[in-house]
Image (spheres, grey):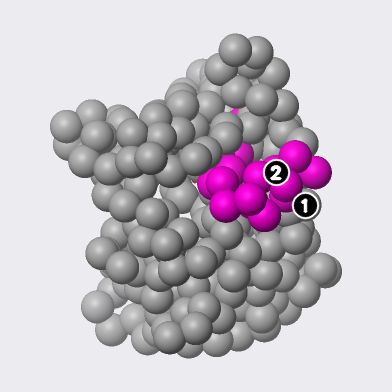
Amino acid sequence: MKLHFRRVLFKLSGELLGSRQGPVDRGALSFFAQEVATARDAGAQLALVVGGGNIVRGSALQDMPLTAGHTMGMLGTLINGVALREALQVRGIPCILQSSLSCPGVADPVDPWRAREALAQGQVVVFAGGTGNPYVTTDTAAVIRALSVEAQALLKGSKVAGLYEADPLKSQEARPIPRLSHREYLARGLKAMDEAAVAIAGEHNLPIVVFKADETGALLLALKGKVGSLIA
Ligand code: UDP
Protein backbone atom coordinates (compact mmCIF):
# COMPACT_ATOMS: atom_id res chain seq x y z
CA MET A 1 0.00 0.00 0.00
CA LYS A 2 1.18 3.51 -0.86
CA LEU A 3 2.51 5.90 1.75
CA HIS A 4 0.13 8.71 2.62
CA PHE A 5 3.04 10.86 3.79
CA ARG A 6 6.48 10.46 2.23
CA ARG A 7 8.59 12.97 4.15
CA VAL A 8 7.72 13.23 7.83
CA LEU A 9 9.00 14.51 11.10
CA PHE A 10 8.71 11.78 13.74
CA LYS A 11 8.59 13.19 17.28
CA LEU A 12 9.95 10.57 19.64
CA SER A 13 9.31 11.37 23.29
CA GLY A 14 12.09 10.65 25.73
CA GLU A 15 9.58 8.69 27.79
CA LEU A 16 9.41 6.08 25.04
CA LEU A 17 13.18 5.56 25.31
CA GLY A 18 13.31 4.88 29.03
CA SER A 19 12.34 1.79 31.01
CA ARG A 20 12.71 0.29 34.45
CA GLN A 21 16.21 -0.77 33.39
CA GLY A 22 17.27 2.87 33.15
CA PRO A 23 16.60 6.24 31.56
CA VAL A 24 18.02 5.21 28.19
CA ASP A 25 17.04 1.64 27.41
CA ARG A 26 18.92 -0.29 24.72
CA GLY A 27 15.89 -2.41 23.90
CA ALA A 28 13.74 0.68 23.30
CA LEU A 29 16.45 2.26 21.15
CA SER A 30 16.78 -0.87 19.09
CA PHE A 31 12.97 -1.14 18.73
CA PHE A 32 12.68 2.42 17.35
CA ALA A 33 15.71 1.94 15.10
CA GLN A 34 13.87 -1.03 13.59
CA GLU A 35 10.66 1.02 13.21
CA VAL A 36 12.65 3.68 11.36
CA ALA A 37 14.35 1.03 9.20
CA THR A 38 10.98 -0.48 8.20
CA ALA A 39 9.56 2.95 7.33
CA ARG A 40 12.66 3.90 5.38
CA ASP A 41 12.61 0.60 3.44
CA ALA A 42 9.03 1.47 2.43
CA GLY A 43 10.34 4.71 0.88
CA ALA A 44 9.77 7.23 3.67
CA GLN A 45 12.10 10.14 4.34
CA LEU A 46 12.42 10.50 8.08
CA ALA A 47 13.58 13.32 10.31
CA LEU A 48 13.28 12.80 14.06
CA VAL A 49 13.00 15.20 16.96
CA VAL A 50 13.93 13.45 20.14
CA GLY A 51 12.53 14.52 23.52
CA GLY A 52 14.22 14.38 26.89
CA GLY A 53 11.51 13.58 29.42
CA ASN A 54 13.27 10.31 30.35
CA ILE A 55 16.21 12.36 31.63
CA VAL A 56 15.15 15.84 32.79
CA ARG A 57 12.04 17.98 32.47
CA GLY A 58 12.91 21.53 33.39
CA SER A 59 9.55 22.30 34.96
CA ALA A 60 9.72 19.22 37.23
CA LEU A 61 13.02 20.12 38.89
CA GLN A 62 12.45 21.31 42.44
CA ASP A 63 14.21 24.52 43.50
CA MET A 64 15.92 24.94 40.14
CA PRO A 65 15.53 28.27 38.36
CA LEU A 66 13.57 27.52 35.18
CA THR A 67 16.14 28.78 32.71
CA ALA A 68 18.71 26.36 34.14
CA GLY A 69 16.17 23.53 34.43
CA HIS A 70 15.04 23.84 30.82
CA THR A 71 18.66 24.04 29.66
CA MET A 72 19.28 20.76 31.48
CA GLY A 73 16.21 19.33 29.73
CA MET A 74 17.61 20.34 26.34
CA LEU A 75 20.93 18.70 27.21
CA GLY A 76 18.95 15.53 28.01
CA THR A 77 17.59 15.53 24.44
CA LEU A 78 21.17 15.65 23.18
CA ILE A 79 22.02 12.54 25.25
CA ASN A 80 19.04 10.79 23.62
CA GLY A 81 20.14 12.04 20.20
CA VAL A 82 23.59 10.51 20.61
CA ALA A 83 22.01 7.22 21.73
CA LEU A 84 19.53 7.19 18.84
CA ARG A 85 22.17 7.94 16.21
CA GLU A 86 24.19 5.02 17.55
CA ALA A 87 21.20 2.67 17.43
CA LEU A 88 20.42 3.70 13.84
CA GLN A 89 24.01 3.44 12.64
CA VAL A 90 24.44 0.00 14.20
CA ARG A 91 21.59 -1.10 11.93
CA GLY A 92 23.35 0.34 8.92
CA ILE A 93 20.93 3.27 8.58
CA PRO A 94 22.80 6.37 7.35
CA CYS A 95 22.07 9.10 9.81
CA ILE A 96 23.15 12.58 10.84
CA LEU A 97 22.64 14.28 14.21
CA GLN A 98 21.97 18.03 14.31
CA SER A 99 21.70 19.94 17.58
CA SER A 100 20.47 23.42 18.33
CA LEU A 101 22.88 23.45 21.29
CA SER A 102 26.41 23.83 20.02
CA CYS A 103 28.38 20.66 20.75
CA PRO A 104 31.23 20.35 18.25
CA GLY A 105 32.54 16.83 17.77
CA VAL A 106 29.25 15.37 18.99
CA ALA A 107 26.55 16.88 16.77
CA ASP A 108 26.39 19.16 13.74
CA PRO A 109 24.63 22.51 14.09
CA VAL A 110 21.00 22.65 12.95
CA ASP A 111 21.00 23.39 9.24
CA PRO A 112 17.64 22.89 7.46
CA TRP A 113 19.24 23.02 4.00
CA ARG A 114 21.77 20.32 4.84
CA ALA A 115 18.99 18.33 6.57
CA ARG A 116 16.75 18.47 3.47
CA GLU A 117 19.66 17.38 1.28
CA ALA A 118 20.33 14.43 3.61
CA LEU A 119 16.65 13.43 3.60
CA ALA A 120 16.49 13.55 -0.19
CA GLN A 121 19.52 11.22 -0.26
CA GLY A 122 17.79 8.70 2.01
CA GLN A 123 19.61 9.57 5.22
CA VAL A 124 17.77 9.88 8.51
CA VAL A 125 18.15 13.22 10.31
CA VAL A 126 17.97 13.31 14.11
CA PHE A 127 17.38 16.74 15.64
CA ALA A 128 18.37 17.23 19.28
CA GLY A 129 18.55 20.20 21.64
CA GLY A 130 14.88 21.13 21.20
CA THR A 131 14.47 24.65 19.90
CA GLY A 132 17.62 25.75 21.74
CA ASN A 133 15.46 28.00 23.92
CA PRO A 134 14.01 27.46 27.39
CA TYR A 135 10.28 27.68 28.29
CA VAL A 136 9.05 25.50 25.43
CA THR A 137 9.18 21.77 24.79
CA THR A 138 10.28 19.45 22.04
CA ASP A 139 6.72 19.45 20.62
CA THR A 140 7.36 23.02 19.52
CA ALA A 141 10.79 22.02 18.23
CA ALA A 142 9.14 19.19 16.28
CA VAL A 143 6.74 21.59 14.53
CA ILE A 144 9.52 24.05 13.69
CA ARG A 145 11.81 21.31 12.34
CA ALA A 146 8.93 19.72 10.40
CA LEU A 147 8.28 23.05 8.67
CA SER A 148 12.00 23.66 8.13
CA VAL A 149 12.56 20.35 6.35
CA GLU A 150 9.28 20.69 4.43
CA ALA A 151 7.79 17.55 5.98
CA GLN A 152 4.24 16.65 4.91
CA ALA A 153 3.24 15.82 8.46
CA LEU A 154 4.36 15.62 12.04
CA LEU A 155 3.92 12.12 13.48
CA LYS A 156 3.83 12.41 17.25
CA GLY A 157 4.65 9.12 18.93
CA SER A 158 2.65 8.52 22.07
CA LYS A 159 2.01 5.76 24.60
CA VAL A 160 -1.72 5.82 23.82
CA ALA A 161 -3.56 5.24 20.55
CA GLY A 162 -4.29 8.90 19.77
CA LEU A 163 -6.40 11.77 21.07
CA TYR A 164 -9.18 11.14 23.59
CA GLU A 165 -11.91 13.27 25.12
CA ALA A 166 -10.35 12.56 28.56
CA ASP A 167 -7.05 11.05 29.70
CA PRO A 168 -7.34 7.37 28.64
CA LEU A 169 -4.81 6.35 31.30
CA LYS A 170 -7.15 7.74 33.98
CA SER A 171 -10.58 6.95 32.52
CA GLN A 172 -11.34 3.74 30.63
CA GLU A 173 -14.47 5.32 29.18
CA ALA A 174 -12.56 8.13 27.49
CA ARG A 175 -13.75 8.27 23.88
CA PRO A 176 -11.19 8.51 21.04
CA ILE A 177 -11.16 11.53 18.71
CA PRO A 178 -10.26 10.33 15.19
CA ARG A 179 -9.93 13.77 13.61
CA LEU A 180 -10.19 17.45 14.47
CA SER A 181 -8.82 20.80 13.32
CA HIS A 182 -5.97 22.66 14.99
CA ARG A 183 -8.50 25.25 16.18
CA GLU A 184 -10.75 22.59 17.71
CA TYR A 185 -7.77 21.03 19.45
CA LEU A 186 -6.91 24.36 21.06
CA ALA A 187 -10.53 25.19 21.91
CA ARG A 188 -11.00 21.84 23.69
CA GLY A 189 -7.86 22.37 25.77
CA LEU A 190 -6.49 18.91 24.95
CA LYS A 191 -3.14 18.03 26.49
CA ALA A 192 -1.50 15.50 24.14
CA MET A 193 0.54 18.21 22.40
CA ASP A 194 1.68 21.61 23.61
CA GLU A 195 -0.67 24.43 22.69
CA ALA A 196 2.19 26.53 21.30
CA ALA A 197 3.19 23.70 18.99
CA VAL A 198 -0.36 23.13 17.71
CA ALA A 199 -0.86 26.87 17.18
CA ILE A 200 2.26 27.13 15.00
CA ALA A 201 1.31 23.97 13.10
CA GLY A 202 -2.19 25.40 12.50
CA GLU A 203 -0.83 28.67 11.14
CA HIS A 204 1.16 26.73 8.57
CA ASN A 205 -1.36 23.94 7.83
CA LEU A 206 0.95 21.23 9.08
CA PRO A 207 -1.03 18.04 9.77
CA ILE A 208 -0.23 16.24 13.03
CA VAL A 209 -0.86 12.55 13.62
CA VAL A 210 -0.84 11.41 17.26
CA PHE A 211 -0.36 7.64 17.36
CA LYS A 212 0.72 4.82 19.65
CA ALA A 213 4.34 4.36 18.69
CA ASP A 214 5.50 1.48 20.88
CA GLU A 215 3.96 -1.28 18.76
CA THR A 216 5.70 -3.09 15.92
CA GLY A 217 4.89 -1.55 12.54
CA ALA A 218 3.08 1.45 14.03
CA LEU A 219 5.31 4.06 12.38
CA LEU A 220 4.70 2.56 8.95
CA LEU A 221 0.94 2.44 9.60
CA ALA A 222 1.04 6.11 10.62
CA LEU A 223 2.83 6.91 7.36
CA LYS A 224 0.02 5.14 5.53
CA GLY A 225 -2.59 7.17 7.39
CA LYS A 226 -3.96 4.00 9.01
CA VAL A 227 -3.58 4.72 12.74
CA GLY A 228 -3.86 7.52 15.27
CA SER A 229 -5.75 10.78 15.50
CA LEU A 230 -5.33 13.45 12.85
CA ILE A 231 -5.13 17.17 13.62
CA ALA A 232 -5.57 18.92 10.27
N1 UDP B 1 13.23 21.94 26.57
C1 UDP B 1 13.40 23.29 26.42
N2 UDP B 1 13.30 23.85 25.18
C2 UDP B 1 13.04 23.13 24.07
C3 UDP B 1 12.83 21.74 24.22
C4 UDP B 1 12.92 21.17 25.47
O1 UDP B 1 13.64 24.00 27.40
O2 UDP B 1 12.97 23.68 22.98
C5 UDP B 1 13.39 21.33 27.89
C6 UDP B 1 12.13 21.39 28.75
O3 UDP B 1 12.52 21.56 30.09
C7 UDP B 1 11.54 20.00 28.55
C8 UDP B 1 12.78 19.14 28.47
O4 UDP B 1 13.71 19.96 27.75
O5 UDP B 1 10.71 19.59 29.61
C9 UDP B 1 12.60 17.82 27.77
O6 UDP B 1 11.83 17.98 26.61
P1 UDP B 1 10.31 17.41 26.50
O7 UDP B 1 9.62 17.61 27.81
O8 UDP B 1 9.70 18.02 25.31
O9 UDP B 1 10.60 15.87 26.26
P2 UDP B 1 9.58 14.69 25.95
O10 UDP B 1 8.33 14.92 26.78
O11 UDP B 1 9.26 14.74 24.51
O12 UDP B 1 10.35 13.46 26.31
Choose between 121 and 163: the one closer to the eye: 121
Q: Is residue 66 visible?
A: no
Q: Which residue is mark 1?
A: 148
Q: Tell me the quadrant of the picture where the C terminus can be found.
A: bottom right
Compared to 61, does 174 lie above or below?
below
Compared to 172, does 160 lie above or below?
above
Dot 1 falls on a residue whose secondary structure is helix
Q: Position of residue 178 (x, y in %)?
A: 48, 87
Q: Residue at x 60, y 85 (%)?
A: 180
Q: Which residue is mark 2?
A: 115
For label 1, the crowd category at 10 Å Cα-Cα, with few meaning under 14, some 14 to 19 and many 20 or more, is: some
- Please state the extent of the stretch shown in magenta in the rendering: 113-129
For label 2, the crowd category at 10 Å Cα-Cα, with few meaning under 14, some 14 to 19 and many 20 or more, is: many
Q: Amino acid at mark 2?
A: Ala
How many marks do you count on the picture?
2
Q: Residue at x 60, y 23 (%)?
A: 107
The circle on residue 132 is none
Residue 120 included in the magenta stretch of the image:
yes
